[in-house]
Image (spheres, coloured by chain):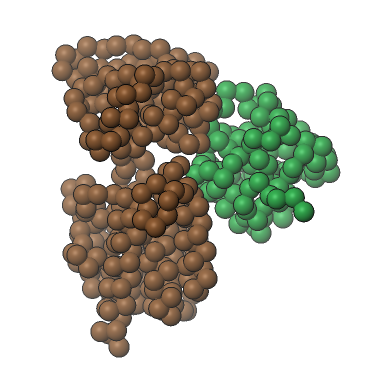
Amino acid sequence: MKMKMLQTAVPEIETASELEKIINENENVMVCCGRMGPMCIPVYDDMEELEKERPDVKFYVMGFDTPEASPIRNAPMCRGFMGLPFTVYYKNGKMVKATTSIQDKGQIVSVLDQFFV
Amino acid sequence: MDEVFDVMILGAGAAGLTAGIYSSRARLSTLILNEGTIGGQMIMTDEIANYPGVETTKGFMVANIMKKQAKYFGCRIKSNIRITGYNLTGNVKTVHLTDGSSFQARSVILAPGGKPRPLNIPGEELFKGTGVSYCATCDGEFFTGKEIIVVGGGNSALEEAVALTTFASKVTIVHQFNNFQAFEHAIQEAKKNPKISFIMGSELREIKGNEKIEAVIIENLATGKLLEMKTDGVFIFIGYLPNTESLKDIVNTNDRNEIVTDADMRTNIPGVFAAGDCIVKKYRQVTTSVADGTIAALSAMEYLRSKN
């Protein structure tokens, strides 16, 4: 059994191909790409709560330091980002929104409401 | 909610979680309501090397363990809430939330903690996450090989400036006074680091750039002279503001909105206690918050016993 990189109840994506599969098989996907750091943990906590409240969205985390996370780290929408975590939102396999640094639950919900109608 | 808890704790930082551990372990029904991040300011600290009994650890690890301990003893924690109102004066105290729910308890411990103090200058909000940071641990490596500014002169500023030299090619500390408020060992560490330079008696007035930060405007406070300095990033460590805006007309606070307590963490309202970074005190450390939380919980127990 593989050791999870991120200590959260939110499911963790470990490979780029897994990420690709998930975003292609689900209409609405939010992925928080970070570390076990102070700006990231609060977002994971919010996602744990949102998993129960938003069945229309699939929530995942991904380790920022794994080379497998390059599709997120190098995404055009994440260009210029200099704060962890990188949080990205996919609609029908396409990245529709990306945010940098800590976001509170209200900010996340606002993105979900805007893009995942 | 009909349940009346023995102890309701507002805040889940070092003080709040400690109070939760103590009161729930004493078999008091305990609820923590948390508006911010579980762990509070503690999780902003990369390395904690002066917590007695622990050689060295990470802030978020201590916070996670405290949360687990509190839950293990039966403490309930409700996060991501927003408080809209308080009624703390009666024997049963009530806290109202934005979702229309309310919670009641026979005693309350206020531990809302603090938040990083912003500079409130043009460009700060615009470049948050793309060059302005309040967390060296989180964002330091994005500045590898770059020149950055660190604002502040306390322990956090100097220790984080030293930590940032792992990544940055040059770190310039800008401080409003001509001397530092940090402990001597932190000052010496910064001074002997060849990558660090200092601009004293000066304040940032603006952070400039287009898609990313390009420069800052620094004012020399003695002469009023403005200096434009090229930089790639700005890290801000100028202390904390207590999260007491909604409490200042409810409990006694000082002119900095810090809650006034006695040595037993009692506020001016019977049955209401306060602990941690929100209270009037000189030293703000994880250890002092843990001590405050302990005292507040024990005082709440004593208060509840006196009411039985």
Query: Color of chain A here?
Result: green
Quadrant that contains the C terminus of chain B: bottom left
> Up-down: is A17 above or below B274?
above
User: Which of these two is toward me, B185 or B306?
Assistant: B185
Question: For this view, does B258 lie left or right of residue B54?
Answer: left
Q: Position of residue B209 (x, y in %)?
A: 46, 16
Query: Color of chain B here?
Result: brown
Quarter of the view holding residue B176: top left
Is residue B278 visible to us here? yes
Figure disc tally: 0
Question: For this view, does B301 lie left or right of residue A103?
Answer: left
Is residue A114 visible to us here? no
Q: Residue at x 36, y 56 (%)?
A: B52
Q: Residue at x 30, y 67 (%)?
A: B296
User: Which of these two is toward me, B230 or B53?
Assistant: B53
> Up-down: is B227 above or below A78?
above
Q: Position of residue A87 (x, y in %)?
A: 62, 38
User: Which of these two is toward me, B72 or B192?
Assistant: B192
> Up-down: is B89 above or below B305?
above
Q: Position of residue B151 (x, y in %)?
A: 33, 28
User: Which of these two is toward me, A21 or B155?
Assistant: B155
Q: Residue at x 40, y 78 (%)?
A: B26
Q: Position of residue B32 (x, y in %)?
A: 44, 65
Q: Residue furthest left?
A: B222
Q: Residue furthest bottom?
A: B308
Q: Residue at x 47, y 67 (%)?
A: B70
Question: For this view, does B165 lie left or right of residue B297?
Answer: right
> Up-down: is B187 above or below A60?
above
